[in-house]
Image: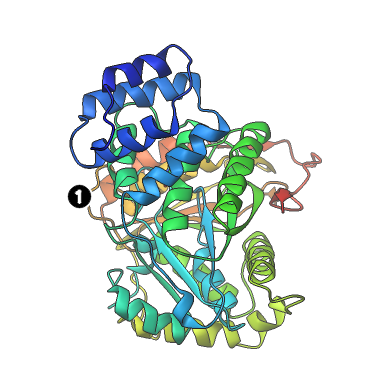
Amino acid sequence: MATTFDTVDIIRTKRDGGELSGAEIDWVIDAYTNGGVGDEQMAALAMAIFLNGMTTEETSRWTRAMISSGERLDFSGLGKPTTDKHSTGGVGDKITLPLAPLVASFGVAVPQLSGRGLGHTGGTLDKLEAIPGWQADISTERMMEILRDPGCIVCAAGTGLAPADRKLYALRDITGTVDSIPLIASSIMSKKIAEGTSALVLDVKVGDGAFMKDLDTAHELARTMVELGRAADVDTRALLTDMSTPLGRTVGNALEVRESLEVLAGGGPADVVELTVELAREMLDAAGVRDADVEAALTDGRAMDTWRKMIRAQGGDPDAELPTAAHTHVVTADRDGVLERLDALPVGVASWRLGAGRARKEDSVQAGAGVEIHVAPGDAVTAGQKLFTLHTDTPERFDRAIESLNGGYSLAPAGSDVPARDSAILDRIN
Ligand code: URA
């Protein structure tokens, strides 16, 4: 008979700063998944881990136990390498949209299992659902067909992948135990490893709009995830990227799809293009495609062709008009000056309050809602110049969105020397 443990002993060990054995970890994750360990006990254990951390061995075993709680996808039959990207989430982060078809246009398969947004960071599936007809739920069989041709898919992760994490993440969300490095790293990596990709590039966001507020903790998270990936034979690398200010010029579902289309057409904001190109290079390199001319695939239409095929393969109409919100409101500069700072978090909250995001899992989102940003830090502005355009179907939301935005930017006196951000990439681990 399999060994069983006393859950209270396990909680006490972690509460008192001790180390759990591999067998204890395997048992507690399995018992939690199957209902033998209750939510109240797992909440206590998660809090003990949050407060006392986990050793490298514990984190690695915890990750493996969560992978073993469910199924693992196997892409070896595709006959081509697979590569994936995971972002820890940020405001205006629409990179998956141009990135997946861009990388697939080089003959590499890109299975992007994504989620819906909760709170101020938007979800990739919510963005794509702004495209008329597009479907997030795809069977594994159809997923394999799409990965053969056109080669990329962005779809909802099935419930069979790392079910222990699904349960634990929901519990952490309501018990103040999300922002723990071993718990975040094991949560993300268990899903990515179970998903079966052979290479993975992590985009670890740093700044007030991200989980990790400073470079040191972001480094620690990135290193932990890279080690977990490599231990599971997944070629894993990480970029650490700035999330102190929003990425690109749009935040909100259809607005972000529009901006992604600009990038796929060879244009788009410099920071979105830079990050798309750098992540594509890393993903291709990790998949064994060296020295790819990634920029050319954006300007000559190859990435756009793959995008159109991917959208069609998932039921969407790439030529359909994207939804627009019924109401707009323009925020203008009240004086001449230079935009000194534009914080990511208040812009994300404004977009969420306009209806682009949800407060509870079961809420619906407005496809057209969000914030268009007309200026970037370092830009000179004159009194009356447009700073932001707010979009929503429900105009009673404007006041609360403006309240959030107002605290999120500042103007320095005209003529001040405010440096523009020259790169969103802060560091890399590879
Ligand atoms: N995303 C995840 O999937 N898990 C976490 O713990 C945090 C972010």
Vertical arrangement, residue 143 with respect to residue 163, above or below: below
Residue matched to label 1? 362
Vertical arrangement, residue 235 with respect to residue 302, above or below: above
Note whether residue 116 is visible: yes
Specify the quadrant of the image occupied by residue 327.
bottom left
Identity of the residue drawn at 28% across and 25% down: 5
The residue nearer to you, when weighing 285 against 127, is: 285
Asked whether mark 1 lies closer than 8 Å to ligand 1, one says no
Element assignment for label 1: loop
Identity of the residue drawn at 23% across and 37% down: 1
Q: Where in the image, quadrant-wise, is ligand 1 located? A: top left
- The amino acid type of the residue labelled 1 equals Glu
- In the displayed orientation, state which residue is furthest to the front: 1
Specify the quadrant of the image occupied by residue 157.
bottom left
Note whether residue 247 is visible: no
Colouring: rainbow
The residue nearer to you, when weighing 135 against 85, is: 85
Identity of the residue drawn at 29% across and 63% down: 326
Instruction: Specify the quadrant that holds the C terminus.
Output: bottom right
Number of residue marks:
1
Q: Residues within 10 Å of mark 1 (few under 14, many from 20)?
A: few
Identity of the residue drawn at 56% across and 70% down: 99
Residue 11: image location, x then y, percent: 34, 19
In the visual, does 406 lie left or right of 6?
Answer: right
In the visual, does 228 lie left or right of 394?
Answer: right
Vertical arrangement, residue 187 with respect to residue 183, above or below: below
Residue 40: image location, x then y, percent: 22, 24
Specify the quadrant of the image occupied by residue 418.
top right
The residue nearer to you, when weighing 242 against 84, is: 84
The residue nearer to you, when weighing 367 against 6, is: 6
